[in-house]
Each structure stands twice: as structure tokens, then as C-alpha cells.
Image: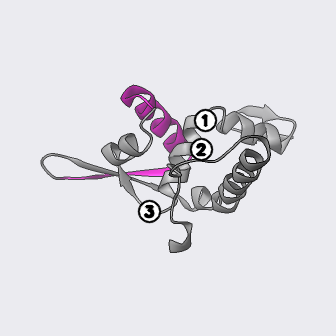
Amino acid sequence: MYYINNKEYKCSVAVTLDIFNDRWKLAIIWHLLDGEKRFKELHETISEITQKTLTVKLKELEEKNIINREVFPEIPPKVVYSLTDVGEKLKPVLEEMYNWGILYSSAHGEITGENSCYVNLGKK
């Protein structure tokens, strides 16, 4: 058994699925893999997400200690998001998901145009 914040899980996969229960969280993490970003940068990069949803998902990831939120005492306030050490550990998982998505798309569809989810993973 696994216990996190008074919640019981029978399987480690259940823990993972509970944390990453939607597409937005993984997209946010994916785009933070190449370095810290401000809210506006994330919103522009993940253009399909609403500002409200992005705010909610960032808060949820922060509560799970996957991302850091750093506020700089400036006017206007500067807020930067980055991955925690635990969040960084998702890099190989997301790289494999990225590669699998290419393989699947090649086998069952087609790939055209620019890859809008590309992150320069070689930086780290």
C-alpha cells in the first residue's frame, strides 16, 4: 500500500494516475523541461489552455511538489515556474512518451508541418 496525504493507494500506478489525471499537467511539465517559464510564456506555448485552467493546474502541480513557483518582489510582480527535483525525474518518461507519439502517429496516421510541442531536451 501507498499512503500520500492520508490517501491510500493499492498500486504505484494509481498514485501516478491520480497526479497526472489530465493532459494539461503533462503538457506544462513538458514545456518546463527546457527551463523556467513565466505564466504568459506557458500560456502562449500551450495555446489551447485557458488562463483559468492553467492557473488551476499550476497550483495543483505546486501542491504535489512537481513544480516550484518563485515570486520576485518587483513591480509588476514577476512569477517564475520551474520543475522541482521530483519534476525533473519525469524527463525520461516524457521523452519516451514523445518518441512513442511519433512512432504511433507514423504508423497510424501522418505527421505534417511543424512540431509545436518540441522542447530542446538536449539542454539538460
| Label 3 crowd bin: few (<14), some (14–19), many (20+), radius 10 Å | some
Marks 1/2 in contact by CB < 8 Å: the verdict is: yes
The question of residue 98 being in magenta is answered with no
The question of residue 52 being in magenta is answered with yes
Tag 1, which secondary structure?
A: helix
What segment is highlighted magenta in the picture? Answer: 49-73
Residue linked to disc 2: 26
> Mark 3 and mark 2: span between their CA atoms?
15 Å
Question: Where is residue 48 shown, x and y percent of the image?
Answer: 45, 32
> Mark 1 and mark 2: span between their CA atoms?
6 Å
Tag 3, which secondary structure?
A: loop
Q: Callout 3, which amino acid?
A: Gly
Identify the residue shown where x is 41% and y is 33%. Answer: 55
Residue 31, disc: none
Residue 35, disc: 3
Question: Where is residue 109 shown, x and y percent of the image?
Answer: 72, 40
Up/down of 30 relative to 8, above or below: below
- Please give left or right for residue 2 compared with residue 33 in the image: right
Identify the residue shown where x is 62% and y is 32%. Answer: 22
Identify the residue shown where x is 66% and y is 59%. Answer: 95
Up/down of 19 relative to 70, above or below: above
Q: Nearer the viewer, residue 49 or 89?
A: 49
Question: Where is residue 83 shown, x and y percent of the image?
Answer: 50, 56
Residue linked to disc 1: 23
Up/down of 54 relative to 101, above or below: above
Q: Quadrant of the N terminus?
A: top right
